Image (cartoon, rainbow, N blue to C red):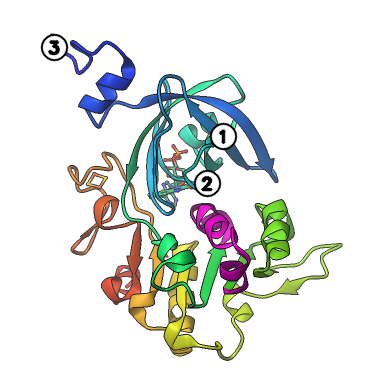
Amino acid sequence: MATVHDGAATVREAVDRHPLVPLPHRVVSRRAWGADVVTLGLEPVDGEPISYRCGQFAMVTAFGVGEVPLSFSSRSGPGPLEHTVRDVGAVTHALATAGPGDVVGVRGPFGTAWGVDELAGGSRAHDPVVVVGGGIGLAPLRGAIEVLTATPDSARRTTVLVGARSPDQIVFDDDLDRWGAAGATVAVTVDAGARGWDGHVGVVTSLLGPRLASPERTTALVCGPEVMIRFATRALADRGVAPGRILVALERNMQCGLGWCGHCQLGPLVLCRDGPVVDAGRIGTLLEERER
Ligand SMILES: Cc1cc2nc3c(=O)[nH]c(=O)nc-3n(C[C@H](O)[C@H](O)[C@H](O)COP(=O)(O)OP(=O)(O)OC[C@H]3O[C@@H](n4cnc5c(N)ncnc54)[C@H](O)[C@@H]3O)c2cc1C
Ligand code: FES
């Protein structure tokens, strides 16, 4: 029987020929954040690193267990690519418990991106950027914030607002300090405080304040639980940010990542192709309609 590997001298060649074949990657680093979130650094076993844009995702395989969509939580560059995974089920558990030397599969990149290079140094290089992340929703934003805080000019224009359910659910705490030190405004809130927490308590939108300095020039990047996305989108629009400049990352059940199977459909959008990053003008009331 013919297989996709026929005639391919290396796994890399097979991958190049067929987008459903995962490219083996070795775990080169592992960092745990709290009880159930882990960032894995991955390098290809064979060949060049894959190149991707912040906001895109990959289908990541725990061999023998299954495949799940995970956003890139690093910026594409010379170092290892990173995925940050919350252990919620069989596949994410297998990935979250992988350690240096283990091999996982990666295929992608897939989907749309935040367009952060434009915001950091392109045509919108003087505009304010507000990043709103809830819980593990900060993972797809992390690479974008790295780009935005890479120069003092864009760091100063960047506000990072982070919400977590409780203090022990805050991820990337070292990064938050580093982004603040680079010049970004960073604020963190928790839904429920705990002993030793003297920070802000309240939902993430409470960090926005009553008004923004230049709402008509502001671009917002939003990712988190869907209810948070809905409230954050509304709060930003109420403060004068145009729907076309409110970019949100949406998650749906994804199987192929290629626009073939239809599992990720949201109204007219095929989110593995038209998303995960979509502007609020395009989703309109689709999220509200799903709730009804
Ligand atoms: C584009 C995209 C990017 C993603 N990026 C990340 C990421 O960077 N880090 C991360 O930890 N997770 C991310 N996810 C979610 C991740 O794919 C799911 O947690 C994973 O598929 C669960 O698989 P499982 O086999 O471990 O658990 P399952 O047994 O399949 O599910 C366990 C529980 O998680 C819920 N669940 C499954 N899929 C999702 C989902 N897409 N969103 C919310 N809940 C879900 C199920 O309803 C169930 O309650 C992303 C999802 C998408 C679509
Ligand atoms: S995951 Fe198959 S069409 Fe989107």
Which numbered disc, 2 or 3, marks the residue closer to the eye?
2
Marks 3 and 1, the one that precedes in the sequence = 3
* Residue situated in front as seen by the camera: 194 or 256: 256
Q: Is mark 2 within 8 Å of ligand 1?
A: no
Tell me what residue is drawn at x 56 percent, y 40 percent: 87
Magenta span of residues: 134-157
- Secondary structure of the residue carrying numbered label 2: loop
Residue 56 on image: x %, y %: 38, 50
The image quarter containing residue 182 is bottom right
What residue does disc 1 label? 41
Q: Indicate the amino acid at tag 3.
A: Ala
Q: Indicate the amino acid at tag 1.
A: Gly
The image quarter containing residue 106 is top left
Marks 2 and 3, the one that precedes in the sequence = 3
What residue does disc 2 label? 74
Q: Is residue 31 visible?
A: yes
What residue does disc 3 label? 2
Tell me what residue is drawn at x 32 percent, y 17 percent: 11
User: Do residues under tags 1 and 2 come within 8 Å of each other at their CB atoms?
Assistant: yes
Tell me what residue is drawn at x 34 percent, y 53 percent: 252
